[in-house]
Image (spheres, rainbow, N blue to C red):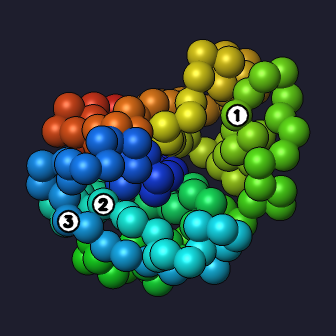
């Protein structure tokens, strides 16, 4: 059975923290209104930067991994993000609680990542992974894991895709 590749959107695919006045090289700007985009900021659509080359990179990794959205976009990643990148509909983690309490200083997603993965090996790309998450996963997960923190100012890089390919091999 192939390992899971758990994919966060904001940070890895959308380098949202890059300088607002400068779109990162290789990215295009998209304006989106996902369901979760509410409150004062909802007057304007959400700005999302996407690098269309990432779709081909992820599809190439799909030979070695089962791709899964691990994002607060949940299934809406299939409506807003996947089509822009040329990805098919992917399974997604339906978080029971978002931004809630987490064990021992870990990121709130980590406990649910472990539940979703079960005993399967997985790689997880996210901009909120810390040493506490790595320690927690290493202690509790029975299979191989790769927790890859991606800089939310830069997004996924060639080196990240190479590391994912090497780890799966």
Look at discs 1 and 3 and give the one toward the viewer: 3
Residue 138 appears in the picture as rendered: no
Q: Could you give the CA–CA distance between mark 1 and mark 3, rounded to whole angstroms?
A: 29 Å
Q: On screen, 37 above or below 164? A: below
At horizontal 33% and vertical 81% (from top left) the residue drawn is 83
At horizontal 49% and vertical 75% (from top left) the residue drawn is 44
Q: Which residue is disc 1 drawn over?
A: 107
Residue 117 appears in the picture as rendered: yes
Look at discs 1 and 2 and give the one toward the viewer: 2
Q: Element type at marker 3?
A: strand
Name the spot of residue 123 as percent of width and height, x first: 47, 40
Name the spot of residue 65 as percent of width and height, x first: 39, 54
Q: Which residue is disc 3 drawn over?
A: 28
Q: Element type at marker 1?
A: loop
Instruction: Place residue 141 in its image quadrant.
Output: top right
Asked if disc 2 and disc 3 are in contact, CB closer than 8 Å, the reply is yes
166 or 92: nearer the viewer: 92
Asked if disc 1 and disc 3 are in contact, CB closer than 8 Å, the reply is no
Q: On screen, 145 above or below 34? A: above
Mark 2 Cα shell of 10 Å, populated few (<14), some (14-19), many (≥20): many
Q: Quadrant of the C terminus?
A: top left
Sequence order check: which comes first, mark 2 or mark 3?
A: 3
50 or 140: nearer the viewer: 50
Name the spot of residue 4 as percent of width and height, x first: 50, 51
Is residue 114 toward the left or the right of residue 44 in the image? right
30 or 22: nearer the viewer: 22
């Amino acid at each position: 059975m192939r390992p899971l590749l758990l994919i966060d959107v904001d940070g890895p695919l959308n380098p949202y923290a890059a300088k607002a006045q400068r779109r990162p090289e290789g990215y295009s700007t998209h304006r989106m209104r996902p369901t979760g985009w509410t409150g004062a900021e909802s007057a304007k659509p959400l700005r999302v930067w996407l690098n269309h080359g990432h779709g081909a990179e992820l599809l190439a990794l799909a030979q070695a991994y089962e791709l899964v959205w691990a994002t607060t976009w949940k299934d809406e990643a299939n409506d807003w993000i996947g089509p822009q990148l040329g990805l098919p509909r992917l399974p997604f983690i339906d978080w029971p609680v978002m931004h809630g309490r987490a064990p021992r200083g870990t990121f709130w997603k980590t406990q649910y990542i472990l539940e979703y993965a079960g005993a399967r090996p997985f790689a997880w790309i996210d901009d909120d992974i810390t040493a506490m998450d790595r320690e927690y996963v290493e202690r509790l997960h029975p299979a191989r894991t790769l927790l890859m923190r991606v800089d939310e100012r830069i997004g996924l890089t060639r080196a990240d895709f190479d590391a994912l390919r090497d780890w799966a091999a």
